Image (spheres, grey):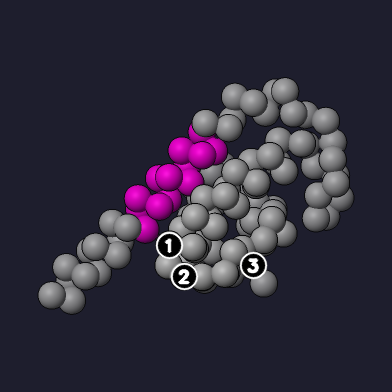
Amino acid sequence: MVISRRKAALRQSADARDAFLAVLEAAAPQRAHREERTAGLYGTVPGWVIDEAGQMLALVNRLRAASGQQPATLEQVLRIEESAHGSDYAAKYALRCVFLARGEDQTS
């Protein structure tokens, strides 16, 4: 019983991660059209960073609402985006948004 609950929780987390990755994948073709610099948390960033963070925030907050949590903020998602550098940027960004959606914000 405990193992099947754990498997279900892991499957749910993997499904949520995949949903966040799909948001990033769908948004990626628009990056070339949003290269202008705009204000970010720690200086200027390409406009696509803010656009994608807004899309990730929308999914975070849908998941949070479904579990009765208060909405997250764009600032929280932008902190996650800023921390997700490297060759596995999308995977880190997606997984950290899953944590935020579950109420486990690790960027504060």
Q: Residue at x 68, y 39 (%)?
A: 51
Q: Amino acid at mark 3?
A: Thr
Q: Is residue 1 left or right of residue 43?
A: left
25 or 101, nearer to the observer: 101
Residue under label 1, please give it.
66
Indicate yes or no whether the magenta region holds residue 86.
Answer: no
Q: CA distance from mark 3 to mark 1?
A: 22 Å
Report if residue 22 lies within the magenta region.
Answer: yes
- Residue type, mark 1 in image: Ala
Q: Is the Cβ of the residue at disc 1 closer than 8 Å to that at disc 2?
A: yes
- Reading the image, the residue beneath label 2 is 68
Contact? badges 3 and 1 (CB < 8 Å): no
Q: Secondary structure at mark 1?
A: helix
Q: How far from the left and from the top, in percent, is residue 13?
A: 37, 58
CA–CA distance in space, label 1 to label 2? 6 Å
Left or right side of 86 for 46: right
Q: Is residue 87 above or below residue 2?
A: above
Q: At 40% from the left edge and 52% from the top edge, which residue is drawn?
A: 16
Instruction: Classify 10 Å Cα crowding around label 2: few (below 14), some (14-19), many (20 and above).
Output: few
Q: Which residues are magenta?
A: 13-25
> Splitting the image into 4 quarters, where does residue 52 fall?
top right
